[in-house]
């Protein structure tokens, strides 16, 4: 899907929820996996839910960077989450993981959050700030309550050597039948996105699955994303998240 085109003309960015076509639910459980923009996409979704008065909770089953914001809670109780959610309309929450990061909430708070009638957005994968990754045996950390999986791929990875652009480059090269010094191509991203061993790993039959092509911040990245969409075809729902209308 070209989020920046309508009737052959470039347009402004539509609402992300509309673009992603996430199935409507009063309490969606949305998990972002992959690399190259997971946190950004979740923040955009959280802002839209907040503007709509839906009061989202953003958390993680792996790690996220800690931020110095009044709605960003570290080691919170469930009561604290509810209180700040009422005041601010949005909460980011996790337990302290040191080194400026948060990790999964304590079990009792986590379970209470999942019982809330609010959108819960979960960063469920890690990539060490790289734009592409291949999952290890224990990844991704998808909650069983997940209703929608956003499989994210950063366009900055395409055209780079696997060893430079990918987290777990050895596994990535082995899956693609390449060397770690080989270049990552659009067809490689499409293959990752369609594989139950990579992008679709752990995705249940009842989970909506959406391929998100992010880091589209130049005409070249936009053309790369379009090529990946063509490679994927109609097999998966693929969405370009970027700024094509500004070019």
Image (tube, helix red, strand yellow):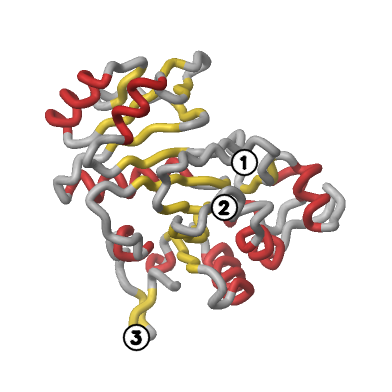
- Whether residues under marks 1 and 3 lie with C-beta atoms below 8 angstroms apart, the answer is no
At horizontal 61% and vertical 50% (from top left) the residue drawn is 201
* Residue 215 visible here: no
Disc 3 secondary structure class:
loop
Residue 5 is situated, as x and y percent measured from the top left of the image, at 38, 76
Q: Is residue 197 above or below residue 68?
A: below
Q: Residues within 10 Å of mark 3 (few under 14, many from 20)?
A: few
Q: Is residue 170 above or below residue 85?
A: below
Q: Where on the picture, by quarter, is residue 136?
A: top right
Q: Quadrant of residue 163?
A: top right
- The quarter of the image holding the C terminus is bottom left
Task: Check disc 2 and report the residue beneath it.
Answer: 154
Residue under pointer 3: 7
- For the residues labelled 1 and 2, the Cα–Cα distance comes to 8 Å
Which residue in the structure is indicated by mark 1?
Answer: 130
Task: Pick the quarter of the image with the N terminus.
Answer: bottom left
Q: Position of residue 113 (x, y in %)?
A: 30, 31
The vertical placement of 9 against 35, above or below, is below
Q: Is residue 186 left or right of residue 28?
A: right
Going by the image, does 117 lie left or right of 102?
left
Q: Badges 1 and 2: C-beta atoms under 8 Å apart?
A: yes
Q: Give the residue drawn at x 47%, y 45%.
A: 38
Compare residues 171 and 112 and report the one nearer the observer: 112
The alpha-carbon separation of the residues under discs 1 and 3 comes to 35 Å
Q: Is residue 6 left or right of residue 2?
A: left
Question: Along the horizontal axis of the image, is 230 left or right of 75?
Answer: right
Sequence-first tag of 1 and 3 = 3
Crowdedness near tag 2: few (<14), some (14–19) or many (≥20) residues, C-alpha within 10 Å: many
Whole-percent x and y of residue 103? 47, 23
């Amino acid at each position: 899907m070209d989020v920046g085109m309508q009737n052959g003309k470039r347009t402004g960015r539509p609402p992300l929820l509309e673009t992603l076509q996430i199935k409507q639910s009063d309490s969606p459980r949305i998990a972002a996996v992959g690399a190259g923009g997971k946190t950004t996409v979740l923040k955009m979704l959280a802002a839209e839910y907040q503007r709509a008065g839906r009061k989202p909770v953003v958390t993680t089953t792996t790690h996220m960077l800690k931020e110095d914001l009044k709605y960003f809670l570290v080691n919170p109780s469930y009561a604290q989450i509810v209180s700040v959610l009422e005041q601010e309309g949005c909460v980011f929450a996790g337990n302290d993981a040191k080194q400026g990061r948060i990790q999964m909430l304590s079990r009792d708070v986590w379970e209470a959050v999942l019982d809330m009638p609010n959108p819960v957005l979960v960063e469920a994968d890690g990539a060490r700030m790289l734009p592409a990754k291949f999952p290890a045996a224990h990844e991704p950390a998808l909650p069983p309550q997940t209703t929608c999986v956003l499989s994210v791929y950063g366009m900055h990875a395409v055209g780079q050597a696997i060893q430079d652009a990918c987290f777990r480059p050895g596994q990535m090269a082995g899956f693609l039948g390449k060397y770690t010094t080989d270049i990552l191509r659009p067809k490689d991203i499409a293959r990752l996105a369609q594989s139950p061993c990579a992008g679709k790993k752990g995705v249940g039959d009842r989970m909506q699955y959406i391929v998100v092509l992010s880091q589209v911040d130049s005409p070249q990245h936009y053309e790369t994303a379009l090529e990946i969409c063509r490679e994927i075809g109609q097999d998966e729902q693929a969405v370009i998240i970027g700024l094509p209308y500004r070019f």
